[in-house]
Amino acid sequence: MKLYKRTWAEIDLDRLKINYDAYRSRIPCGTEIMCVVKASCYGHSDCAVVPYLQNELGVKKFAVSNLDEAVRLREMGITGDILILGYTSPDETPDLEKYDIIQAVMSTEYAAELSACAEGSVRCHAAVDTGMTRIGVRGTAEEIADRLCEIAAADKIALEGAFTHYAVADTMTDDCIAYTKSQTELLFAAADIAKSRGIALKTVHSLNSAGGLYHYTDRSALARLGIILYGLTPDVSLNLPIDIKPVMTLKSTVSQVKEVEGGVDVSYGRTYTTPHKVKLATVACGYADGYPRALSNCGEILVHGKRCKITGRVCMDQFMCDVTGVDVKPGDTVTLIGEENGESITADDIAQLTGTIGYEIVCGVSERVPRVAIRNGERSGIYKL
Ligand SMILES: *Cc1c(COP(=O)(O)O)cnc(C)c1O
């Protein structure tokens, strides 16, 4: 694939390794790391990232959100365990078997449906709802254990594990810390009861990125490492105990530079009027690239190391910014997410301006933005999302 210069995302695998190593060294080695690579690695491109995780970092367990994502991994040569954290239609059970995928099972009824559609046997982890109220079997430890036993007893179900998901692992108030602890206790109490009834699950796990750092328990066989792998924080108010680096940089290109007098309206809706004579640059990126329209009149970008304000509305494919005093010309590269000369704009900065979280910003960088992998400081490949 060829890179046509307009808007692109750089995916720095050297930084991915730094983040992985930092997390790995923080978590006792008895706890295996399962890399969460759903949503094409949180928008970083599964083709760019997952083979690197497997072949260079030795990762053997992956989690995705759906069967499409799982099959993509198998087709790119991923041989380790792949767990689907979300829903698969029971009709598609034969593909779970064909591609040797582990499916999350949220109820006894769902287990029965998978079983009815299975040819041989389907590998499963039971989802246990301990407080997220999203998917999973619910109730007291006894009741959850009952459900685990029912699922394990389903005909063509190979129940290998069980997992839960934390609701507030990234929130350090006393109340939230206690909530997370109760989630952990409920999962492992249920697993203990199931075990006493002869259902010994090999892989019971609870930790997500924040869980591993703030609520570590050696009872969790795995830590499901997501956002921190990509160098973003689970919550901006946390002071992480490890140094991580954002893996994604978003770059674009200046298409035009012009000086305009004061009193000139800029972009759709005339929401910005130049206060005096200014120099404006037009940038070839817009909301169809996943650059939020909510940054209209409030975002900033880096132009040759200087912070420049977005003027007027962000359009579908372009926006304008004030580059007064900056030596810039058409064709120059600008940074929308990333660093230049010690100045930085992170996905979390953009998230704060637009009322969301960094996760949504990186997942939102759209398919038309090519992902350029960087390895040993050099471009090593170009990928479509
Ligand atoms: C997305 C997800 C994770 C990863 O969460 P991070 O906050 O990115 O670490 C882990 N487990 C489940 C079930 C998830 O859905």
Image (cartoon, rainbow, N blue to C red):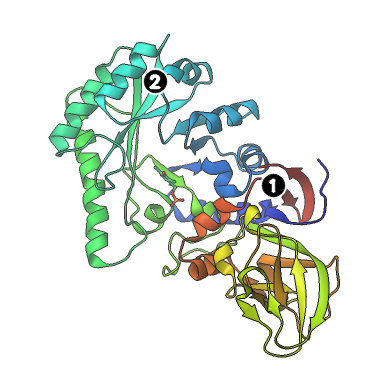
Whole-percent x, y for residue 57 in the image: 61, 43
The structure residue drawn at horizontal position 16% and vertical position 38%, both measured from the top left corner, is: 139
Whole-percent x, y for residue 244 in the image: 56, 62
For marks 2 and 1, give the one nearer the viewer: 1
Question: Looking at this view, is 43 or 262 the one in front?
Answer: 262
Residue at image mark 2: 90
The structure residue drawn at horizontal position 27% and vertical position 44%, both measured from the top left corner, is: 133
Q: Residues within 10 Å of mark 1 (few under 14, many from 20)?
A: few
CB of residue at label 2: within 8 Å of ligand 1? no
Query: What kind of residue is marked 1?
Result: Arg
Q: Calculate the distance from the C-alpha at mark 2 to the C-alpha at mark 1.
A: 32 Å
Q: From this viewpoint, is residue 208 visible?
A: yes
The tag earlier along the polypeptide, 2 or 1, is: 2
Element assignment for label 1: loop
Tell me the quarter of the image containing the N terminus.
top right
With 358 as the anchor, is 333 left or right in this view? right
With 225 as the anchor, is 314 left or right in this view? right
With 367 as the anchor, is 93 left or right in this view? left
Question: Looking at this view, is 217 or 375 the one in front?
Answer: 375
Query: What kind of residue is marked 2?
Result: Pro
Compared with 6, 165 (above or below) is above
Whole-percent x, y for residue 316 in the image: 66, 57
Whole-percent x, y for residue 112 in the image: 29, 17
Q: Residues within 10 Å of mark 2 (few under 14, many from 20)?
A: some
Question: Looking at this view, is 379 or 117 the one in front?
Answer: 117
| Residue 87 marker | none
Q: From this viewpoint, is residue 30 visible?
A: no
The structure residue drawn at horizontal position 31% and vertical position 24%, both measured from the top left corner, is: 110
The structure residue drawn at horizontal position 77% and vertical position 44%, both measured from the top left corner, is: 381
Residue at image mark 1: 368
CB of residue at label 1: within 8 Å of ligand 1? no
